[in-house]
Image (spheres, rainbow, N blue to C red):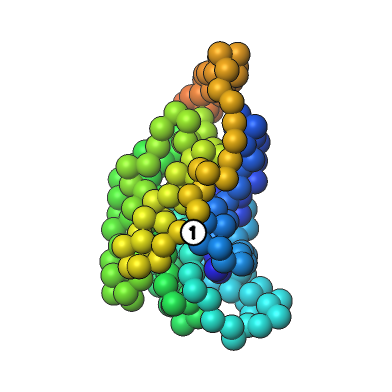
Amino acid sequence: MLAFGDSITNGGGELQWGVALQSWALWVARALGLPFTSYATDGARAVDVVREQIPMFLERSAHPHARYEVGCLYIGVNDVRALDWDAVAFESDFRTALAFLLDRCEHVLALTAPLELGRPRAGAKVADMDEMVRQVAGSLGTLVVDLRDFGARNLVMADHVHPTAFGQIAIAERALAVLSSVGIEARVAPRSLIAYEVTRWRRLRGDLTYAYRQAKESVKAATRRAVFGRRPRGRGSP
């Protein structure tokens, strides 16, 4: 399995009820019983996949011409939240990256982004980007994992961008369902690979932590709206 993308695909972060935050793509690979190779990097945009991650793969891979069973591309969250969002450039870079994966993988997954993305919200641009993802994937014949309605208190962090540990598993489950529709069945369910205990104290601590972080994000969002009008790309980018 071969993956490109930003920090959402790169994975890593704090525990959630004792469960490690791992990349959704890694969970998919584990469920399918496939070796996993990722070139995703934090803060990446579509152009970074084309100019940095793909060349990195070609230069560093021990077998750059090898075939993969599944390829994954989840990119665009940083693009659409940036002040310099360029729909034409994004579509071109996204198509190039997806075509690269298609040349090397039996099946390729492209993911859309949640419509309620970011604080302040990225807005209507997200729906436009998602439509581009769907159109490009359709024209190339790749699979689409629809995350437009993705988002819940225990699945997305307070910034409404990064998935929690459980959120990564939930994304993996959606990806596995899409793969199942074309006859690729998981050998094991990702949820069966984790163990955790929910106690009243853990739930209370989690609720208080989330409320505190949500308040911080609200203040930061209000400041950004006042200063920039919309959110610039910065250190908090995935």
Asked if residue 207 can be seen in this view, the reply is yes
Up/down of 226 relative to 140, above or below: above
Q: Image quadrant for the N terminus?
A: bottom right
Residue, x 50% and y 53% (percent of image)?
188
Residue, x 53% and y 76% (percent of image)?
68
Residue, x 61% and y 42% (percent of image)?
21
Asked if residue 230 can be seen in this view, the reply is no
Q: Which residue is mark 1?
A: 187
Q: Amino acid at mark 1?
A: Arg
Q: Quadrant of residue 52?
A: bottom right
Up/down of 79 relative to 182, above or below: above
Whether residue 199 sits left or right of residue 74 in the image: it is right
Characterize the local packing of mark 1: few (<14), some (14-19) or many (20 or more) Cα atoms within 10 angstroms.
few
Which of these two is toward me, 104 or 19? Answer: 19
Up/down of 62 relative to 145, above or below: below
Residue, x 42% and y 72% (percent of image)?
107
Q: Position of residue 209 (x, y in %)?
A: 59, 20
Q: Quadrant of residue 116?
A: top left
Q: Position of residue 73 (x, y in %)?
A: 47, 63
Q: Position of residue 158 (x, y in %)?
A: 51, 30
Q: Position of residue 49 (x, y in %)?
A: 55, 67
- In this figure, what is the number of numbered marks? 1
Regarding mark 1 in the picture, which secondary structure is present there? Answer: loop
Up/down of 15 relative to 132, above or below: above
